[in-house]
Image (tube, grey):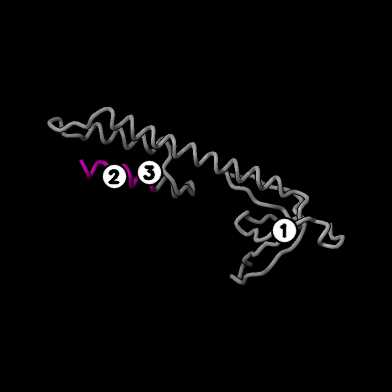
Amino acid sequence: MIDGVSTLLSANSTSRTAENKSYLSMEDFYALLVAQLSNQDINNTVDNTEFISQMAQFSMIQAISDLSQQSQAAYSVSLIGKAANLLVEDDLGNQKTVIGVVQGVNLENGKASVVINGNSYPMSSVREVYDASLLGGEE
């Protein structure tokens, strides 16, 4: 039983890595559910309400994750036209500060990034946001 589930998890983990995912999808949950059902001990079966409870919990976590991504996207769009102070890392690993007006937003693979001076930066690098007029005409 454990070997079958371990093999399944290992295969799904490899596919998630290839897709650059770090979370369990609903497909992963269903695959685990099928593996658990097909490998359970017939003398000690799992209660169906337990499966329904697990599915409801997983659905709730998925919904919260989706809401979080949508919230970050909405927040990033609200930054357009505002000045931002970012802390970014260059190719050599040195940290530098970028200051400028947010010209746009890129939304790719559920992640938002801001565009300043034609360059795209992840939202996680934004350290400060303020009114663009405080830049002194650099708009």
Q: Give the range drawn in magenta.
A: 1-13
Residue 61: x and y in percent read: 44, 40
Tags 2 and 1 in contact by the CB under 8 Å rule? no
Give the labeled residue for mark 2: 7
Q: In this view, does 35 lie to the left or right of 77?
A: left
In the rendered structure, the answer to whether residue 118 lies left or right of residue 110 reads right
Residue drawn at 62 percent across, 48 percent down: 112
Magenta highlight: main SS: helix
Q: Number of numbered discs present?
A: 3
Can residue 4 be found in the magenta stretch? Answer: yes
Locate the C terminus and report the quarter of the image it occupies: bottom right
In this figure, which residue is indicated by the disc labeled 1? 84
**Element assignment for label 3:** helix
The quadrant the N terminus occupies is: top left
Q: Mark 3 points at which residue?
A: 12
Q: Image quarter for residue 47?
A: top left
Category of crowding for the residue at label 1, using alpha-carbon neighbours closer than 10 angstroms: few (below 14), some (14–19), many (at least 20): many
